[in-house]
Structures are given as C-alpha cells and as structure tokens.
Image: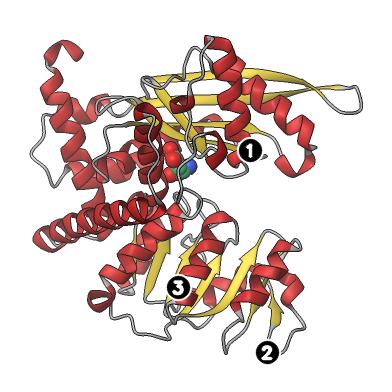
Amino acid sequence: MFTLFDNTLKRLIEAAEHLDLDPGFLEKLKNALEMTQARLPIRMDDGSTKSFLAFRCRYDDSLGPTKGGIRFHQQVNGDEVMALALMMTSKCAVMDLPFGGAKGGVKVDPHSLSNMEHESLSRAYVRAFAHVIGPDRDIPAPDVGTNEKTMAWMMDEYSTIVGKRTPAVITGKPVALGGSLGRDDATARGAYNIIQHKARTLGLKRGARVAIQGFGNAGMHMAQLVAADGYKIVAVSDSKGAVHAPAGFDIGELLAAKRCGRVINMAGSAGVSEIPGDELLAVDCEVLVLAALENMVHKGNAESITARLIVELANGPVTPEADEVLKAMNVVILPDILANAGGVTVSYFEWVQNREGDRWTLDQVHARLKTAMEREADAVWTYAREKNITLRTAAYVLALSRIAAAMEALGTDKF
Ligand code: GLU
C-alpha cells in the first residue's frame, strides 16, 4: 500500500528521468528538511480540555522561504502533511515563485469547534510553531478547513510573540488586516485562466458541461467563473451529498443552496436529482473538476469517468495508478501543482504587498495572476510536447529543473 507521500515522491522521481541531473539533487529531495510535531491542548467551551495533534513540515527551502497552507481536518497525519509539503515545493517552483514548500495541519474536525475554540486552536498552533514560521522563514496560508479568520488570529498571535506587527508572516488574511484583494477566488481563477488560455488546444467549446467534486472555496468559485463564461454546471457534490442537473444548474440557486449549508438542498428543484456521491465522477460531462481531497480518483473508479478533461483544484486527487488508466483513455489532466497554483501565486502577491506596505487593486492582481498562469502553462505544455509526456510529468520536470538550478547555485557545501 503506497502512501500519499510515496505517490508524490514517485512523480518527482519519474520527472527526474527526463532531466540530466546530478543524482544528489533528487536524493536530497527524498526527505523533508524539517518536520515538527506538537500537541495543542485547548480549553473547550464546556470547561474540559482537549489535546489536538499538530504538524508543520518545511520540505525544501532551496528556492526561498518555505510556503504552504495549514489544514484543519480529522484525517490529518504526518505522511499527508509531508506529501502536501512536497507538492507545495513543486508548486512554488512551477510558478517560478521565490519560495520553497511547506505544509501544516491539525487533526481536528473544524465543524465540531465553536468560534472561540477555533480561535484558541489557531493561536495555540502559532505559539507551538512560532520558532518554525516567520516572514523570511516559513509563511503559512489557508488550506482545507481553515479560512481568512484563522489567518487573522494566527497573524495577531505571531505579532504579539515577536512584539511587532508582522502581516507578511501569513497570507490569505482578511483584506482589513493586509490580505490581498483577489486572494479569495485565486485558486479557482488560476485554473480558469489556464482553461481560457488553452481552450482551443483542449477542444473546449462554449456550453461544455462541467461536474464539480467538492463545493468548498475553490469549487464554488470555479462554478461561478465558468458559469459566467457559458459553461454548464451539470453536477456538484460536497461532503453531505451530490446533485445532478443534466440541463445545467441555475448558478444563483446553487450558490444560495450552499450558503444554507449543503448542495443537496437543491434536490427537488426542477430538473435536479440527488445522486450517490461516488456517482458524480461518472456523470456525463466534458470537464471534471476535482476540488475535494486527495486520492478521490483511484484505479477502482477511474474507468467510470466520461470527462475528456480533469482539472485538479484539490491537491493529489488522482492516484498514480488512476493516472495510467486515464492516460490510456486519453483523458487530459490539468495537474494540481499547476491547476491550483493560483492560490499560492496570489499569496505571493500578498506577501510582496505586506513587505512593501503597498496595496494593489483587484485589476492589478487579476492581470498579474493571468500573466503568471499563462506563462507557466505555456512552459508546461512546451515540455509535454517536446518530451511527449503528460502535463503532470511536464509540470514536475519544470519544477525540478528550477529547484535543481537553485541547489546547484547554492554549492556543494549544502550537501
Ligand atoms: N493551501 C493552498 C495550496 O495548497 C495555498 C497555499 C498558500 O497560499 O501558501 O496551494
């Protein structure tokens, strides 16, 4: 049984075969730079104490201070955090950002926490990892189960510890506290920019049908962006269930249903039926957006997919075995480390603004994001064509070539 970390490393090793590299570079990347674990004891609202397991992994810092989100989820574990930190390392390199990769997590069901407990846990996380993070060392951000409120509390706690207001220690903050305009929908917008840019190559036409697995921040924004562009959203799912509307959802109604809690609230509206969650993948459509969690498409269900294009808004949603199946089916996969990199790219913009004491307009953010996404998508496509490899392998090749160049420049003393 391969773990998420094994699978992630495997993709990097595969990419290395297409580059003429000093084997020492890859050897170095087989282990994380730094993995810290802590317990976070929290006083709950009812007066009891609960202890939560927490991690922060800084995977590699060859390209710069490490960067990556903090996840609050009941399935968080060390292997997953390390795998996601390695993915962040590759993601920042694909986007040519001056960052290495990191990830953090707390094993907790965030929905079980009150607002005050969420705040205590966020602040406790920063107290435990204050020596690990920092604006020039390791810069966290939101991930599954955390949001701009979490980031605000964390920034405030860090500022108190170091005795000075330090907005650049964390990104994805509320705009009122130095967050960047355009960070909220950046993950989806980055993927949307690529889809627009490559629509012709991908054979996408107006009215193409889209199914979305996962209707959190990324999935919801994606639905809004593509629907405004004439695509038809025909199926969506969240952790509570899935709904299917073969003729397309009214996007306004869909978002309203989600705001009231869950997408299955849509079931019963005209033309909408509830379907079992695992049937979403098999729905008749042209584009499948994976915006839930890792390992959702595996060798047991990959064959049921009808879409011609898969967009990975989540990290690691397709296993390497499923990659093989989908390749044989000629399904194109827009890989996570490129497709969902809009989030960390606007996080970088936020960090730059914080350090300069500047604020960019929404138009500036959108324009710079579009330029970055199109530039790196072109670079990935070029590698894929030249070397006759998948977009995923090409993205890892691009990432690895940049990390290796930095390692080389750092010199042999670093080994
Ligand atoms: N958690 C997001 C990701 O997986 C964003 C990371 C960031 O903005 O640093 O890409």
Q: Nearer the viewer, residue 405 or 45?
A: 45
Query: Looking at the image, in which quadrant does ligand 1 appear?
Result: top left
Is residue 146 left or right of 369 when viewed as pictured?
Answer: right
Taking 390 as reference, is 6 above or below it? above
37 w.r.t. 99: above or below? above
SS label for mark 3: helix
Task: Report the residue marked by disc 3.
Answer: 226
Select label 2 or label 3 by which is in front.
3
**Residue 319 quadrant:** bottom left
Name the spot of residue 202 as percent of width and height, x first: 27, 75
The answer to which quarter of the image holds residue 259 is: bottom right
- Distance between mark 3 and mark 1 Cα atoms: 27 Å
Residue 360: % across, % down: 37, 44
Tell me the quarter of the image containing the C terminus.
Answer: top left
| Residue 359 x, y percent position in the rendering | 40, 40
Q: Is residue 361 visible?
A: yes
Can you give x and y, in whole percent of width and height, for residue 353 in the image?
37, 35
Residue 271 disc label:
2
Q: Three-letter amino acid code at disc 3?
A: Val
138 horizontally vs 338: left or right:
right
